[in-house]
Amino acid sequence: MPVNTKRRREPISEPGADAAGLVQQAGADQVPVHVFASADDPLVPVSNGEYLAQRIPGSRLTILPASHFAWEEIPDQFAALITDSVTEAENRTSQ
């Protein structure tokens, strides 16, 4: 059965304990956070990624030209973004 890619779920307006805990922990530890969202994801709207990126200090958001399984749809681009994020984080901690 085909997935309706036009459907969008509402963004997280009142995060549950898990999302709130994630935001609080990542911000408190100053962990380098790179939030990924997929522009055409029928299950998780971009607004969820925006919500997290806006609330985690120092984080950044990348919106990928993909659906729900970006690592399968654009594997080379996805791998490059992960590699760049890890390299950046390592460089920050070694300074």
Image (cartoon, rainbow, N blue to C red):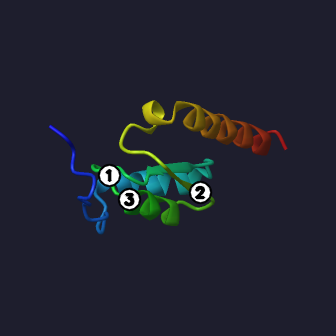
- Up/down of 3 relative to 51, above or below: above
Which residue corresponds to the image point at 50% horizontal and 36% vertical from the top-left?
Answer: 74
Which residue corresponds to the image point at 26% horizontal and 60% vertical from the top-left?
Answer: 8
Q: Amino acid at mark 2?
A: Ser
Pick the quarter of the image with the N terminus: top left
Q: Amino acid at mark 1?
A: Val
Mark 1, residue position: 44
Q: How far, Cα to Cα, is label 1 from label 2?
A: 19 Å
Count of marks overlaid on the render: 3
Q: How far, Cα to Cα, is label 3 from label 2?
A: 14 Å
Tag shown at residue 59: 2
Quick check: marks 1 and 3 in contact, CB under 8 Å?
A: yes
Mark 3, residue position: 48
Q: Residue 70: image x %, image y %?
A: 44, 39
Which residue corresponds to the image point at 44% horizontal and 57% vertical from the top-left?
Answer: 49
Horizontal side of residue 51 vs 94, given as left or right:
left
- What kind of element bears circle 3? helix
**N-term-proximal mark, 3 vs 2:** 3
Q: Residue 30: image x %, image y %?
A: 62, 52
Q: Specify the quadrant of the image occupied by residue 89.
A: top right
Horizontal side of residue 91 vs 54, given as left or right:
right
Q: How far, Cα to Cα, is label 1 from label 3?
A: 7 Å
Between circles 3 and 2, the one closer to the viewer is 3
Horizontal side of residue 7 vs 68, given as left or right:
left
**N-term-proximal mark, 1 vs 2:** 1
